[in-house]
Amino acid sequence: MSGILLVMTNLPDAASAQKLIRQLVESGTAACVTQLAPGTSTYRWQEKIENACEIPLLIKTTQAAYPRLEALILASHPYELPEIIAVSVTAGLPAYLDWVSQATSPNLREE
């Protein structure tokens, strides 16, 4: 469609989630971040089965802004190997998708 992505990541607690959300929106790498209710993730890490309570984030961005977004998540995420999954948006309300594009445009960051 228009290069819009939905990026997912999980944080270990509300404080680190809020810090990352603020960085992503203030930097213009995300138009919007939705913090979901905590959930339990079960996964294999370093040959052990782990369970962790995590805060999921749904991040709305563009393909153009994705490299900056990924770098920012990697720089500030507390996990050694954070989950960062990007899914292409193939349909959506055109006005909303336009807003995501405009909100993440580097041109808007120049003030």
Image (cartoon, rainbow, N blue to C red):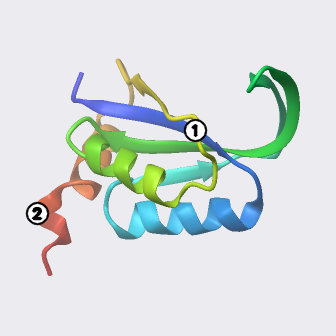
In the figure, is residue 51 to the left or right of 87?
A: right
Of circles 1 and 2, the one toward us is 1
Secondary structure under tag 2 reads helix
Assess disc 1: are there few (<14), some (14-19) or many (≥20) residues with their C-alpha within 10 Å of its C-alpha.
few
Residue at the far front in the pictured view: 47
Tell me residue 75's x, y (percent): 44, 57
Residue annotated with mark 1: 81
**In this rendering, position of residue 72 left or right of residue 63:** right
- Residue located 51% across and 60% down the image: 76
Tell me the amino acid under the disc marked 1.
Answer: Leu
Determine which quarter of the picture holds residue 61.
top left
Measured as percent of width and height from the top left, residue 100 is found at 32, 47
The percent position of residue 51, horizontal first and vertical second, equals 88, 33
Nearer the observer, 24 or 2: 24
| Disc 1 element | loop
Check the image and report above or below for 22 versus 70: below
Q: Quadrant of residue 91?
A: top left
* Residue 31 vertical placement versus 80 (above, below): below
Instruction: Give the image quarter of residue 88.
Output: top left
Q: Which mark is residue 107?
A: 2
Q: In the image, residue 96 lies at what x, y percent?
A: 36, 42
| Residue neighbourhood size for the residue with mark 2, other residues' Cα within 10 Å, grouped as few (<14), some (14–19), many (≥20) | few
Disc 1/disc 2 C-alpha distance (Å): 31 Å
* In the rendered image, the vertical position of residue 74 relative to residue 3, given as above or below: below
Residue at left offset 54%, top offset 62%: 20
